[in-house]
């Protein structure tokens, strides 16, 4: 019974993580850039903060939105 409860908690945690974070492919798609460009940004300290979790580079969706708002520039005609 304890094993089932643990498995349930792990699956719930995984779903919560997937809802909270974007992986590199998702963020690159959001910005319509390649993953290589995203990697270059990260190496230069540009772009939203990222986290290494379970061997994967992940971006917190809230921090992505904050970074976008901070770096938003309106182009005037």
Image (tube, helix red, strand yellow):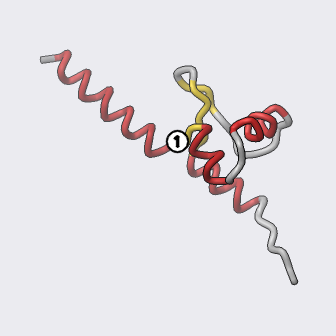
* Neighbours of disc 1 within 10 Å: few (<14), some (14-19), many (20+): many
Q: Quadrant of residue 18?
A: top left
Please name whichever residue, 56 or 50, is drawn nearer the observer in this view of the structure: 56
Q: Position of residue 67 (x, y in %)?
A: 71, 53
Q: Is residue 19 above or below residue 11?
A: below
Q: Quadrant of residue 66?
A: bottom right
Q: Residue at x 76, y 64 (%)?
A: 72
Q: Secondary structure at mark 1?
A: strand
Q: Position of residue 16 (x, y in %)?
A: 39, 40
Relative side of 18 to 77, left or right: left
Q: Residue at x 70, y 62 (%)?
A: 69
Q: Quadrant of residue 9?
A: top left
Q: Residue at x 48, y 44 (%)?
A: 20
Q: Which residue is mark 1?
A: 21
Q: Is residue 2 above or below residue 25?
A: above
Q: Quadrant of the C terminus?
A: bottom right
Seen from this angle, which residue lies furthest left? 1
Q: Position of residue 15 (x, y in %)?
A: 37, 38
Q: Residue at x 57, y 45 (%)?
A: 26
Relative side of 18 to 55, left or right: left
């Amino acid at each position: 019974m304890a094993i089932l409860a643990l498995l349930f908690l792990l699956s719930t945690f995984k779903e919560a993580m997937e809802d909270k974070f974007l992986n590199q492919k998702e963020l690159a798609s959001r910005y319509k850039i390649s993953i290589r460009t995203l990697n270059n940004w990260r190496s230069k300290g540009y772009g939203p903060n990222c986290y290494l979790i379970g061997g994967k580079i992940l971006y917190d969706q809230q921090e992505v939105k904050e970074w976008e708002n901070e770096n938003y520039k309106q182009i005037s005609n």
